[in-house]
Each structure stands twice: as structure tokens, then as C-alpha cells.
Image (cartoon, helix red, strand yellow):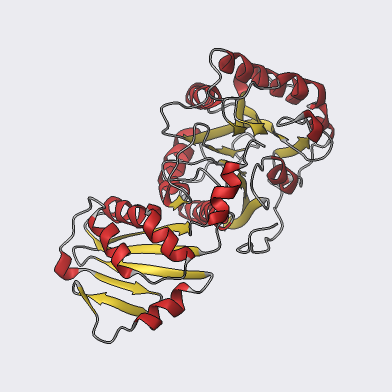
Amino acid sequence: MVSPLFQPLGKALPVPGFRVGSASCGVKSASLRGKRQDLTLIVADVPAHAAGVFTTNAFRAACVNFGEATVREFGSDIRAIVANAGNANAGVGDMERVWSQALIDLGAKAAGVNSNQVLSASTGVIGTPFPIERITETIHQSVDSLAEDNWQAAAEAIRTTDTFAKWSSRQFDVNGKTYTITGVSKGSGMIHPNMATMLGFIATDAPLSAPRLQALLSKIADRSFNSITVDGDTSTNDTVYLLSSGLGLGYTELEDTSDFEKALTEVAIELAQLIVRDGEGVTKFVSITVEGAETEQQARLMGRKIATSPLVKTAFAGSDANWGRIICAIGNSDAPIVPSKVSLRADDVLIVKDGNLHPDYRDEMGMKVFKQQEFSLTVGLGLGEASATVWTGDLTHEYITINAEYRS
């Protein structure tokens, strides 16, 4: 069943210099071969510049370590991404590196490039032997299906417990030239800031060098992929790659990146929000904005604390405007506060002002807001000019059911 928070998506736009294919390998189970796509191959027809952001989990998968090293050493000459769903190839000992390298080598052979030009990613069950032989037998399907306009199929092929595929596109003009950004992502559980059980692949023909791409992606990730949470768990495999074909196509590098940054931010935020909308068992989409902080980092820290509180999230699930739980989370965030300056709104309903319950507030006013599928919380700190927004959902019985049965 598709998440009740799903919103129809526009067309995923082709990006000059890239082709995308997919295959059905039966990675999670041989019985699924031919029934659902679970391998994605993204091929750059020219040397692409690359950037990446990765999980902070200390037990991270070998594909993450390989990818980070490849971006660092060969980030101006990337030619392919190969990614599978159904098995994370994580937590399986020494063979993890062997299988990860084998996947890279298969991707390189399929794309007709060298292995050091290939990035890989895996997602799915942790701690299960990786069925590399199934990929070996069927990866040719991804080559046969390579096409410029196949991004939506790629989004389908990286799903695990996702109830819908996720993609986003934007175009922008600079000096009369139109550039395109298209991204796909997956994720619905084990989602928490500092990356989550999510994969994201973004491609553009905007001409930027690898170092400039890296700086922008790191900045934008904090305001998108690192500003979402579903359940407070950070996974072993989380990866977002950004590839640019523009310099390889012979375009002149952009001097002013403001339009690119704006469009990339919009793509990244949309992809991140789609992950929350598809959160396991989620029935509410909640935007939490912290205003008046001394720094953006402090504002985000507090927003995350509210967004990850099980007591707050179960209140969301029960449509219970239990503002005391939110105040408690604010005080537990380790961000500086002066209680007498704190305010709290639910949409346009002022609940707390100057640290006290507003005299005009009535419980039914808050309950009306919390009953909505989508609403916002705004915390005012009165300490500075910085702000940040994070996005989260509720915590329901369905989340427990999905994860209790995840491996069955």
C-alpha cells in the first residue's frame, strides 16, 4: 500500500551526458528475479566530476569506504554508478570487501570503463551473504535498458521497503544556457540525520569541478538529507552522490553558482522530504522550524531533538497536542535556551509565549492542528537570527509491524 502522504511527482528529466538502466537480479531472494527491478546502472558518457556524502555510522559498509576513496582520488573522472537493493553487503566480515569490489568490477565491465571510475552502493538487509552470482548473471539487463530518460526506472530499482519511487528534477538558465538536475533517492526506515538508510544519486550537466561540487553538496546535505528523521537510526550504507557531466561535455565552468545551488537545494529537499513522506508506518508529515537561535547548527540540533523524541512522535500519531512533551524535548536538546524567551506555535496557533502557556490557548485548538496529515511546529528562542527546519513523521504501530517482519 502506498503511503497516505504520497504526492504525485512530475517527470524525471534526462540529463545530457548520462544514460540509466536497470535489471531484475533477485538480490534479496532468487524468487524475486524477473518480478521487480533491483539493480541500477548509471553511465556517464563523458568523464564526470563527482562529490559524495556518506554515513557517519562507524560500522559502515565496504561500498561506502570504497566510494569515499574513489571520489577523493578519481573524482574528476567518474564514469558509472552501480547500485543494488535487497542486500546491504554490510556486517558480513572479510567477504564484504571482496563482494563490494566484485560489484564495482561488474559495473565497470557493463559500462565499458575502468573499475577506478565506478562508484557502488548497496541497500537492504544487513548481515546476509551477498549474492554476487545473481548480479553477475543478470547485470546485462541494465546495459540493454540504458536510456537517457530512464531515471524513473532507476528510482524503482533502488527501493527496499519504500512504497513509492522517489525522484526530482529542476532546470535553470545561466547566460541563455539551460542546465538540468535530476536526482533519485530511496529510504523509508532507519532514517536519521548524518545520513540514513538512504541512497541518493543526483546528476547534472552544470559544469563544475569536483572540489566545487563537494563543497556545495556538503552544505546542501545539511539542509536536506541531514535534516530528516523517521526513527532515529543511522545506517551502515547511507550515500549520496552528485555527478556533473558539464566539463566533460566541453562546457565552460560556471563562475557564479548561485542558481545551481538554489536548484540543487530544491532537488535535495524534495528528495529528502519524499523519504519522510514514505517513512515506515508514517501517517503525519511534520515540519519543525527553530527560529531565533544563535547559530544554524544550534537551531538544527534542537529541531532534531524534537523530531526524534518518541514521546513527541507518538503524540503526533495520536493527534494529541501534548505541548509539554515538546517543551521537554526543547530543554533536552543541549542547545542554549532562556526559558522565559521561548515560544511555540502549531501552524498559526500560539501555544507558548515567553516561556508560559498563552492565556488564549485552548487544548482543542492544538488538537485540531495535530489531527491534520501535515502541519508545522515553530519554536522561537529569542536569542539570535539563525534558524533551521527539519522534517519528521509520527511513530505508529505499523512501524513496529514492518520492522518486526522485515526479513521474512
Q: Is residue 359 left or right of residue 157?
A: left
The spot of residue 194 in percent (x, y) is: 41, 41
Q: State which quadrant residue 397 falls in.
A: bottom right
Q: Is residue 162 left or right of residue 212?
A: right
Figure label count: 0
Please report the residue visible at 33 percent of the width from the left and 53 percent of the height from the top: 305
In this rendered view, identify the residue nearer to me: 136 or 332: 332
Q: State which quadrant residue 193 falls in.
A: top left
The spot of residue 185 in percent (x, y) is: 60, 46
In this rendered view, identify the residue nearer to me: 327 or 164: 327
Q: Residue furthest bottom?
A: 360
Q: Is residue 315 left or right of residue 385?
A: right
Give above or below for 104 relative to 35. Answer: above
The answer to whether residue 271 is visible is no
The spot of residue 17 in percent (x, y) is: 69, 39
The spot of residue 184 in percent (x, y) is: 63, 46
Q: Quadrant where the C terminus lies?
A: top right
Give above or below for 212 relative to 395. Answer: above
The answer to whether residue 154 is visible is yes
Give above or below for 103 relative to 254. Answer: above
Please report the residue visible at 39 percent of the width from the left and 63 percent of the height from the top: 288
Please report the residue visible at 33 percent of the width from the left and 84 percent of the height from the top: 362
Q: Quadrant where the N terminus lies?
A: bottom right
Q: State which quadrant residue 117 falls in.
A: top right
